[in-house]
Structures are given as C-alpha cells and as structure tokens.
Amino acid sequence: MYFVKVYVTYKDSVLDPQGEAVKNAVHRLGYETVEDIRIGKYFEIQVSAEASAVEETIEGICDKLLANVNMETYRYEIEQLEGI
Amino acid sequence: MYFVKVYVTYKDSVLDPQGEAVKNAVHRLGYETVEDIRIGKYFEIQVSAEASAVEETIEGICDKLLANVNMETYRYEIEQLEGI
C-alpha cells in the first residue's frame, strides 16, 4: 500500500484571485507582514497497486481529473506504508 | 523573507464527502487500485516578518482564517528565502 501526497497549484503565470482575496483578509486581521498568498489543492491518496504502477496511476489521475494542466501544475510524494 | 507551506486537512474523525466523490470518479476512470482519497487545502505564504514572529503569524492566520479548528487540523513548513 502506498500513501501519496499530491499538491496542485496554479502556474506562476496564472493570477490567483482567491489567494489575493485571502491576503487582503489577512491584512485586515492585522498581519501586515504577509506579502503574498497563493492557494492550491492538496490530496492524500492511498493506492494498493504495485510499486511500478503507482506513479502511472497518480499521473493519470492528476492529468485527467485533479489538475487542469492548462493552468495548473502538480507534484507528488510517494510513501510506502509499512506492514500493509 | 520566509516562505511557508500550510496544509489544512480534515481531522481523521471527520467524514470527507468531497474526497469520497473524487474517489468514485477515479474508479469510473478505471483506477480501481485507489483505496482512499482525502482532500485538503494548501497555501503558499510569503512573510517578511522576523524569524521569531513567523510562527506566531502563521498560527494566528491559520486559527482565525484558514482552518476551521473544530473540524480541521493544519501543519506548516517554514523555509527561509535566500538573499531577500
């Protein structure tokens, strides 16, 4: 069993209006030292495939479902769960 | 300048219906080896505070704005940006 953490973020060239709105809210709370906030998505995925198939599975899911590859980029970390 | 990555996730005891829906969609795409998906939020925050104030700033923002501490938990990683 593998435990995969996937991070989906906007590409740097894409504006993030939601992050901008959160930054403004943070400033109104008094945290003026916050210079920038960008918001992404985070997924924790458990996969029971063989080691060789995990990457292919994750990249397939990201490309087809979790990320809009025109505007977003993703990265992932694979951990093996012990004893399962 | 510090670069902080914040991960907000549901507590384990809280159901994640959005994750369940995504898991069903992933199965319909043919990725039957995916056992579980949980969805969280991911924030990339740049802070220009002194080192001693960064943790306090981040925890304040998370507690007040980014996470609903009744249902969600958060963790964060602080990196120092070089040369800024």
Image: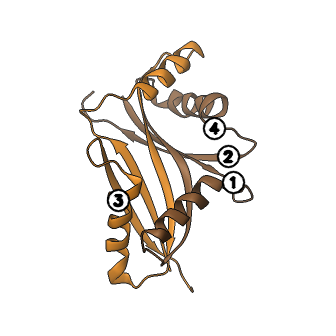
Chain colours: A brown, B orange
Q: Name which of mark 1 and mark 4 comes first in the sequence.
A: 1
Q: Which residue is mark 2?
A: A72
Query: Residue A16 appears in which quarter of the rendering?
Result: bottom right
What kind of element bears circle 4? loop
**Both marks 1 and 4 on one chain:** yes
Between A59 and B53, the one lying in front of the other is: B53
Q: Name which of mark 2 and mark 1 comes first in the sequence.
A: 1
Q: Which residue is mark 3?
A: B64
Q: Which residue is mark 4?
A: A67
Q: Chain of mark 2?
A: A
Q: Which residue is mark 1?
A: A11
Q: Chain of mark 1?
A: A
Q: Name which of mark 2 and mark 4 comes first in the sequence.
A: 4
Quadrant of the snapshot with the C terminus of chain B? bottom right
What whole-number distance in Å separates the C-alpha atoms at marks 2 and 3?
28 Å
Q: Is the Cβ of the residue at disc 2 closer than 8 Å to that at disc 1?
A: yes
Query: Residue A80 appears in which quarter of the rendering?
Result: top left
Neighbours of disc 3 within 10 Å: few (<14), some (14-19), many (20+): few
Residue B49: percent from the left, percent from the top? 43, 82
**Both marks 2 and 4 on one chain:** yes
Between B27 and A37, the one lying in front of the other is: A37
Q: Is the Cβ of the residue at disc 4 closer than 8 Å to that at disc 3?
A: no
Q: Chain of mark 4?
A: A
Identified by mark 2, the residue type is Glu
**Both marks 4 and 3 on one chain:** no
Q: Is the Cβ of the residue at disc 1 closer than 8 Å to that at disc 3?
A: no
Residue B71: percent from the left, percent from the top? 29, 41
Question: Is residue B31 shown to the viewer in this render?
Answer: no
